[in-house]
Amino acid sequence: MCSGRVDPAFIFKAFSNGSDGVFIGGCRLGECNYITQGNYHVLNIVLLCKKIMEHIGLNPERLRIEFMSSGDGIIFTEVINDFGKKVKDLGPLGKAEGINQNDLKSRLAEITRLVPYIKVVKNEKLEKRLENPEEYDQFFTSDEIDTLLREVASYYIDPAKCQACMTCLRRCPAEAIVGDKNQIHVIDHEKCIKCGTCFEVCPPKFAAVTKISGEPVPPPIPEDQRTIVRKSREK
């Protein structure tokens, strides 16, 4: 598999499943067989994930990326042995950081759920090609990640404005919108991935979707109050 296909969710799920360390190997930078140069993309993914790991209290040295060719067998062996020793020295995931297992699973689950949102917000940066290793450490800053995860937007469908046009329901990539014809739509926030698609596609003439940041989302309208009664047209 091309290293460019590595998704942040793969990394955090590996940790969620009990891995004490995650290693990613890719082709040498500038030697990708594809015009997309996916190894630059995965480098940015790793730099982002390391900062997120710091944010949730995990040692970022548990995640490592190296670039080499298929002929670098000796180098590969040395790198893997070095990383294995490093992870062993760090100790079990969570325990070494002083995080109990329930809290660890909760933090990783929340970050994994936010991956689509994070990718949307940081898409432009993730597409950049870093040529200078000196740029790596500060490409994503701790303050930047703190702000990113503190200001996660939520979305709310105003029942007074929703006309049950089904546009947001059909376009939601996570199938997080509950509704039907003549039924006011409601966002299931357990499924919502914060991508903002509903906000973008809601017809301007309705403007029923509100973006909310820094405050709680209003409770959903009760199911028995969701039916829209249309006024019949006079003949």
Image (cartoon, rainbow, N blue to C red):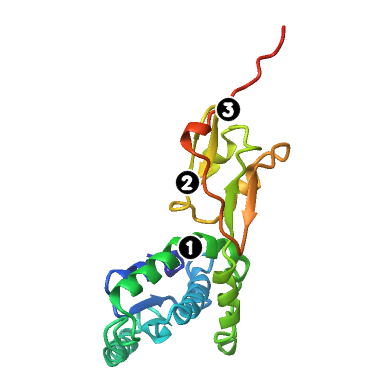
Q: Which mark is residue 114?
A: 1
Regarding residue 151, the answer to whether it shows in the image is yes
Question: Residue farthest to the top?
Answer: 235
Eyeballing the image, is 208 above or below 113?
A: above
Quadrant hosting residue 184:
top right
The kind of secondary structure element at disc 1 is helix
Distance from disc 2 to disc 1, alpha carbons, whole Å, reads 14 Å
Q: Residues within 10 Å of mark 1 (few under 14, many from 20)?
A: some
The label on residue 228 is: 3
N-terminal of the pair, mark 1 or mark 3, is 1
Verify CB contact (< 8 Å) between mark 2 and mark 1: no
Q: Do the residues labelled 2 and 3 touch (CB within 8 Å)?
A: no
Which residue does the image show at 47% across and 35% down from the upper left? 223
Q: Residue 176 carries which label?
A: 2
Cα distance, mark 2 to mark 3?
20 Å
Residue drawn at (29%, 84%) of the image = 95
Front in this rendered view, residue 160 or 98: 160
From the viewer's side, name the closer residue of 98 and 220: 220
Q: Please tell me which residue is depicted at 40% across the width and 79% down the height of the picture.
A: 69
Residue at image position (61%, 71%) is: 125
